[in-house]
Image (cartoon, helix red, strand yellow):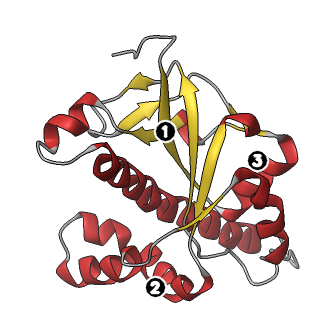
């Protein structure tokens, strides 16, 4: 189900610190699978009560959860590099366990209710100019995010202990940054 090609919608794109660096360096980013999250008609229907701000928070939380999956994939990719190359070194300290979500205004996103209520597929890469804000965990969230990355699949399958660990990570609010602040934030990490 396409959204009208001329309609602009706010989307929430799951990211990681390396993906944010790529966005700054290349001035554009194509998310994995062109997947993002947004306030869609299916999300509105699923939450009969709730205003646009509350529904946007739901979509952003879905993107933040997807960010944890991306962190896990990056970590596992680094582990594979270590296993495949004798003497190979990974980035100092390994992955950065901070969820990141890019809020951007895009046109041409297609609804994907077959995947989830808030999922949309982007028509192409986003440009830095389309970014409205970036949301990133603060340093104090890192221990909980690191633990949650390990158990996110188990939590999705109903493991109550894993759900508790995931909840600890999701209790942390993402900090808001203006797009022009992003290069400075990345320098500090």
Identify residue for label 2.
144
Which residue is nearer to you in this view: 115 or 50? Answer: 50
Asked where in the image residue 88 lies, by quadrant, the reply is bottom right
In x, y percent, where is residue 47?
16, 45
Q: Are marks 3 and 1 in contact (CB under 8 Å)?
A: no
Q: Picture coordinates of residue 159 (x, y %)?
A: 20, 76
Residue 58 located left or right of residue 132: left
Image position of 114 (left or right of 67)? left
Q: Residue at 17% x, 69% y: name it.
A: 158
State the residue position of label 3.
23
Name the outermost residue toward the top: 5
Rendered residue at 72%/73% (across/down): 83
Q: Tell me the tag on residue 84.
A: none
Q: Secondary structure at mark 3?
A: helix
Measured in 3D between alpha carbons, the distance from the residue under mark 2 to the one under mark 1, in whole angstroms, is 26 Å
Q: Read off the residue under disc 1.
A: 11
Residue 106 in the image: above or below residue 177: above
Frontmost of labels 2 and 1 is 1
Q: Determine which quarter of the picture holds residue 184.
A: bottom right
| Residue sticking out furthest to the left | 48
User: Marks 2 and 3, how far apart in space?
Assistant: 26 Å
Q: Position of residue 20 (x, y in %)?
A: 72, 55
Mark 2 and mark 1 residues within 8 Å of each other at the beta carbon: no
Q: Position of residue 145 (x, y in %)?
A: 48, 78
Q: Earlier in the sequence, mark 2 or mark 3?
A: 3
> Which residue: 68% across, 67% down?
80
Comes first in the chain, label 2 or label 1: 1
Which numbered disc, 3 or 1, marks the residue closer to the eye?
Answer: 1
- Mark 3 or mark 1, earlier in chain: 1
């Amino acid at each position: 189900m396409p959204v009208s090609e001329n309609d602009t919608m706010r989307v929430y794109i799951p990211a990681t610190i390396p993906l944010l660096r790529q966005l700054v360096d290349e001035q554009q980013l194509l998310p994995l699978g062109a997947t993002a999250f947004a306030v869609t008609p299916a999300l509105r229907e699923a939450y009969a009560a709730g205003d646009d701000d509350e529904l946007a928070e739901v979509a952003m939380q879905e993107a933040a959860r997807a960010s944890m999956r991306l962190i896990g994939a990056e970590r596992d990719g680094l582990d594979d590099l270590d296993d495949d190359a004798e003497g190979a070194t990974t980035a100092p300290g390994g992955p950065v366990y901070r969820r990141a979500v890019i809020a951007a205004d895009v046109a041409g996103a297609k609804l994907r209710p077959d995947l989830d209520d808030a999922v949309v597929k982007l028509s192409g890469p986003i440009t830095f100019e389309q970014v409205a804000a970036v949301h990133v965990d603060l340093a104090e969230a890192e221990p909980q995010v690191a633990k949650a990355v390990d158990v996110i699949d188990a939590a999705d399958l109903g493991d109550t202990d894993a759900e508790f660990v995931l909840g600890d990570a999701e209790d942390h609010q993402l900090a808001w940054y203006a797009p022009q602040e992003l290069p400075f934030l990345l320098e500090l990490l």
